[in-house]
Amino acid sequence: MFIVIIGNGRAGSMLAGELSRSGHEVVVVEKVAENFKRLPVDFSGFQVEGDALEQDILKNARVDQADTVIVITGNDKVNYMVAKLAEHVFKVPKIIVRLTDHKKLHIYNDSKQIEVVSQYDLLVKGMLDSIGRIEG
Amino acid sequence: MQIMLVGGGKLVYHLAKRLIAKGYFVVVINKDEIYTKELARELNATIVCGEASDKDILEDAGAFRTDVLVALTQKDHDNLFICKMAKEYFGIERTTSIVNNPDNESLFKKMGINGIFNLTELLSSLIEQNVVSEDIRNLVTLEEGKLSVSQIIIPEDAPAAGKKVRVINLPLSIVLGGIIREGNVIIPRGETVIKPGDKVLVISLPEDQALAIRILGGEN
């Protein structure tokens, strides 16, 4: 599968490494060149340096051909707009977005192609599960 | 009517001042503490210091009672997000936003933002017109610049001066909408003669505008 990852922070770089290792074609878009150092040494995908809010940068990253776009920067507002550009301008069939503030989840209501992953919901769920295991 | 303004700088200050003078209830949201304090001193409006994309801040600022939200920040992603928050969470029907990057206008339109002001484009086209020529004025562009309406004052040496509309051979993508001669409006037909000094209203595709100017306006 051809996957474009927007944001190469701690989460993005880890995901990029995993996906590239399991044989997917991966392009990573990141605004700060310095952050590309985070990618593992065996990462075999491409790097595009630039602001993903610029449509030209998304075009360079071939978002229009992507099977999946993963938007994983730490800024909910940036993630929303990039996801919407991927949905409406580049017609990407599947978009996965990271959400930090779970109160903002409702804003994705009208998005069919977009799947939202709420990080704190996952964290809390993980904690509750492990409590369940101790008690259980 | 209650109007909520999000953003800062002189623009928000002067816009708020004008709206208040017209009798609207104005709420301004900005995250800068010094700016909001200053505004609170100068304006008879509700000033809220906080992050406008935060649901709780919007609610505290009275979003449920707001009729129009205007997003005026310099970041397009903030503007888009705040407008959508206003719509999805608080049912604010009318949202207006400035667009800083011209490429984003079509996305904003698709996302249902009602009023869109493409600042960079507006300013650059105004300045361009002012610099380029006094005889040619771009009046309006429709549908994000897919159709342009401009006004050309016919100079003495124009290729079309003194000729009938029929013989100047305009391509089909250029239409003359009207001629203003000595204050009277003439609807051009094939037999109408174009005279120097006529103000001609030209409707064309933007890519053919230069051609229209060459035929009607001469070399310059």
Image: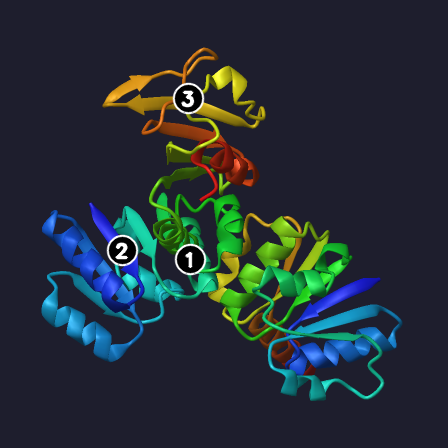
Q: Is residue B157 left or right of residue B40?
A: right
**Along the line of sight, the residue nearer the viewer: A127 or A81:** A81
The type of residue carrying mark 1 is Thr
State the image coordinates of residue B207 (x, y, percent, origin top left).
Answer: 56, 40
Secondary element at tag 1: helix
The answer to whether B76 is drawn above or below residue B148 in the figure is: below
Q: Which residue is mark 1?
A: B120
Q: Which residue is mark 3?
A: B162
The type of residue carrying mark 2 is Met
Q: Quadrant of the C terminus of chain B?
A: top left
10 Å crowding of disc 2: few (<14), some (14-19), many (20+): many
**Along the line of sight, the residue nearer the viewer: B54 or B26:** B26
Q: Is residue B215 visible?
A: yes
Q: Is residue B171 left or right of residue B194?
A: right
Q: Quadrant of the N terminus of chain B?
A: top left
Quadrant position of residue A20? bottom right
Residue farthest toward the right in the current orientation of the protein? A23
| Nearest-to-viewer mark from 3 and 1 | 3
Q: Earlier in the sequence, mark 3 or mark 1?
A: 1
The type of residue carrying mark 3 is Gly
Mark 2 and mark 1 residues within 8 Å of each other at the beta carbon: no
| Nearest-to-viewer mark from 3 and 2 | 3
On whether disc 3 and disc 1 are found on a single subunit, the reply is yes
Secondary element at tag 3: loop
Q: Which residue is mark 2?
A: B4
Q: Chain of mark 3?
A: B
Residue at 64%, 81% (x, y): give it: A9
Residue farthest toward the front in the current orientation of the protein? B157
